[in-house]
Amino acid sequence: MLLLILTLLIVICAVIPQYWVRYVMRKYSSEIDDLQGTGGELAQHLIDRFELSGIKLEQTTEKGGDHYDPVSSTVRLSPANFDGKSLTAVAVAAHEVGHAIQFHRNEKISQLRGTYIPRSIILSKIGSGMLMAMPLVAVLLKSPPAIAVYIGISLLVQLAGALMYLIVLPEEWDASFNKALPILEDGEYLNAAQLQAAKQVLKAAALTYLASALVNVVHIGRWFLILRR
């Protein structure tokens, strides 16, 4: 019973942030005619305003999502945010340009994502691969204690990969509140009422990686419960 309660608490703590991020993005995605431009137009304006030479702007697919690609020096926005005249589109565009500013200025904080996300992906793949190979390993080891240790190591490897997403949180927070927010606060783009809503979108954008990390933790917990039976 205690295990079930703990499981439910973990699931709730992981699911709520993810749905909150989606809720905020949808809530402020309605078109606003009196905005000065679309998210794509704002992003291009900011690239020019801050003289981010070499930084490109592209529209990506919905699946590709909104992100800054440091490899190709490209700000990519989903169709809804590239062409949309909404608070979500404007705030997300400012957030992604915030990342471009971090990299263009070669700020130390910009190295977090490039350093730890690839490691996170590698660890997750290694942990998943270890679990997939478990039937063969079980035949080879034959010892239940040894098999349990093997499973524990695979889950810990995956957990380490998931928690690395949390290391990236300062970079995301900086892009939202040290870069994008001051830009939107100067009164040129949004009025006071719109700015309050934009702050919620910026917070959601900053917490996207946190939400992903928590969901991955739940998946790892699910594997633990399955293999524990």
Image: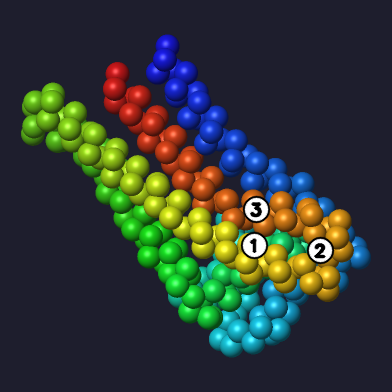
Residue at the disc numbered 2: 85
Q: CA distance from mark 1 to mark 2?
A: 21 Å
- Tag shown at residue 177: 1
Q: CA distance from mark 2 to mark 3?
A: 19 Å
Q: Residue at x 57, y 59 (%)?
A: 173
Q: Residue furthest top?
A: 1
Between disc 1 and disc 2, the foreground one is 1
Considering only order in the chain, which callout, 3 or 2, is on the residue closer to the N terminus? Answer: 2
Left or right placement of residue 177 versus residue 107 in this view: right
Mark 3 closeness class: few <14, some 14–19, many ≥20 residues within 10 Å: some
**SS under mark 1:** helix
Where is residue 97 drawn, in percent x and y? Answer: 63, 72
Residue at the disc numbered 3: 203
For the N terminus, the image quarter is top left
Q: Amino acid at mark 1?
A: Phe
Q: Residue at x 24, y 34 (%)?
A: 152
Is 34 rendered above or below residue 73? Answer: above
Between disc 3 and disc 1, the foreground one is 1
Considering only order in the chain, which callout, 1 or 3, is on the residue closer to the N terminus? Answer: 1
Left or right placement of residue 118 versus residue 195 in this view: left
